[in-house]
Amino acid sequence: MDRKALLLCIAVIAIILVQFNHLLPKGKNTGSDQARVSAYFCPEDGCSQVVIRWIERANKSIDLAMYSFTLDSIGETLVRAKERGIRVRVILESERIDRYSEYGRLRAAGVEVELDRNSYLMHNKFMVIDGGVVLTGSFNYTWSGDKKNDENLVVIVDEGIASAFESEFNEMWSGIFGK
């Protein structure tokens, strides 16, 4: 299946899910019938630039849970967001911290960044912006994820879905400090 056909299929599925959301089994804090969903594919869609544009639009908060994070451009944008007064909290997988990780840069800049203390891998890849926007998908914030691998990034604009992700983030964040 070529790329255009795949994108068309994804768009049709997204429209169907939004239109028939009331028929689906309800999960925790599911979205409204008005959710806006956009799909991006790396490397051709420049996923890092999509993430950066959304970070730059933040007005009050950014909560990020990321498995692997080595991409300087996104790290720098998060630091600038903190400098503009945005509350930025980051949870990273402890087994993915090395000299290339953005962990040190973020900590040095005063960003609230913690390592997951779960004994299993924290394989989440999501960001919640201002309690209303979720960025999620397979996209790790790495050069390979952005320029080499076949990855995806889904942007969901919906307060209900954002609330579910925010609840998960807060549960993880409190677990870090509760142990």
Image (spheres, helix red, strand yellow):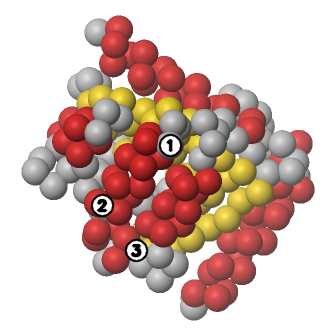
Residue 82 versus residue 64: which sits nearer the camera?
82
Among numbered discs 2 and 1, the one appearing first in the sequence: 2
Q: Amino acid at mark 3?
A: Asp
126 and 90: which is toward the camera: 90
Kindly report which numbered mark, 3 or 2, lies closer to the viewer in this rendering. 2
Give the residue type that dot 2 points to.
Leu
Q: Which residue is mark 3?
A: 150
Report the Cα–Cα distance between label 2 and label 1. Answer: 21 Å
Is tag 3's residue or tag 2's residue first in the polypeptide sequence? 2
Which is more foreground, mark 2 or mark 1? 1
Q: Are marks 2 and 1 in contact (CB under 8 Å)?
A: no
Image quarter where the C terminus lies is top left
Left or right of residue 108: residue 161? right
Q: Is residue 73 above or below residue 64?
A: below
- The residue depicted at 67 percent of the width and 65 percent of the height is 38
Q: Which mark is residue 71?
A: 2
**Rendered residue at 30%/60% (across/down):** 71
Q: Nearer the viewer, mark 1 or mark 3?
A: 1
User: Where 9 falls versus 33 (above or below)?
Assistant: below
> Element at badge 2?
loop
Q: Quadrant of the N terminus?
A: bottom right
Per the model, the C-alpha gap separating discs 1 and 3 is: 33 Å
Q: Which residue is mark 1?
A: 84
The alpha-carbon separation of the residues under discs 3 and 2 comes to 16 Å
Query: Would residue 135 appear left or right of 159 to someone viewing this image?
Result: left
Q: Count neighbours of disc 3 (C-alpha within 10 A) and say few if under 14, some if 14 to 19, many if 20 or more.
A: some
In the rendering, which numbered label is found on residue 61? none
One can see residue 152 in this view: no
Instruction: Return the x and y of residue 100 as percentages of the image width and height.
Output: 15, 55
Which image quadrant is residue 37 in?
bottom right
Question: Closer to the camera, 99 or 172?
Answer: 99
